[in-house]
Amino acid sequence: MTVDHAARRARLAALLPAREVPALLVTSPVNVRYLTGLDSSNAAVLVRADGSALLATDNRYIGTARALDVPVVEATDVAGRLAEPGAGIEAASMSVATYRRLGDGLVPLGPVVEELRAVKDEAELELLRTACAITDQTFADVAGRIVPGMTERELARLLESRMAELGADKPAFDSIVAAGENGAVPHHAPTDRELRRGDLVTMDFGARHQGYHADMTRTVSLGPPAGWQRELYDLVAAAQRAGRHALAPGAAVEEVDRAARSVIEAAGHGGHFRHGLGHGVGLEIHEEPFLGPSRTGRLEDRVPITVEPGVYLPGRGGVRIEDTLVTREGGPELFTKTTKELLVL
């Protein structure tokens, strides 16, 4: 599918009158790519309320930029070249130093483009679907190769090399592999700790495909699980099902989180689940919207989002199960499809 960047800019332009600005100076590299197709380390785009736009980048990217569907100028100081009196700026991405240098008259705004990006078009969803398929196949291919004596680092490298072999641009993020007691740390960085029989092993990883990020977590058991491990896994699986079933256009993000969190709290483990239920994915691995107990807003149609409850027992281990899904009017579409049954290896 062809990406219609002009349509994206038109959607943004239509939002600007309500923000009381004549234009928005977009400096976030991810947002510049979303609006123009240019992937660079130094570019900005000015989108005006009348629908016109101007892209600026330096001589490293100007040749690529000239092939796009937006007028372009060459500049090193891209923000300075495009800044206009009264224009809005992206407060979250522009440095204070740049803001002060550009002078008075610019209007700091919140995540306008990020809110647009939350709802994906079908071209984006197809790219994300492919990223998730690579991630699924990687897990299927690697699971049978996980054995006692392998280190967390070795398993992480195996996951990432297999994703590359299957066509990933690169990993969507640094892969997490947490064995045994390390599973109690949600974002544990892999170490030389060896996998042992009796461990639960949590793997959180994903492929990036043409800029779009997949995210999936699976927990497996090396050898038959102990009773407490099976109970913990079944609890997290039940919470994950509840969270997935709560995804729907119009659902409040706090209530989706509550659907899963209440299952864990009812089992007496509320204090062992201390992160949000999930987050949007797309050109970034963490993007709007976010599912959590203090988050506000409602889901829309065609929003890719993760559902990833976990229970973490300090000194013992933990379980997390995560899928990437997309909200649909008829029920969420599951993008990461490998089994969520507890695999005993």
Image (tube, rainbow, N blue to C red):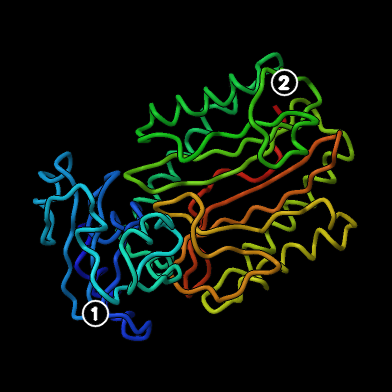
Query: What amino acid does circle 1 point to?
Result: Ala
Furthest residue toward top:
149
Query: What amino acid does circle 2 point to?
Result: Leu
On the image, the x and y values in percent for residue 119 come to: 41, 68
Q: Residue at x 26, y 61 (%)?
A: 35
Tally of marks: 2
Instruction: For the N terminus, give its image quadrant.
Output: bottom left
- Residue bearing the label numbered 2: 195
On the image, the x and y values in percent for residue 141 come to: 51, 28
Q: Which one is closest to the eye, mark 1 or mark 2?
A: 1
Instruction: For the C terminus, give its image quadrant.
Output: top right
On the image, the x and y values in percent for residue 232 come to: 82, 46
- Residue bearing the label numbered 1: 49
Q: Secondary structure at mark 2?
A: loop
260 in relation to 221, above or below: below
Front residue of 39 and 235: 39
Q: Secondary structure at mark 1?
A: loop
Q: Residue at x 68, y 38 (%)?
A: 219
Q: Quadrant of residue 122?
A: bottom left
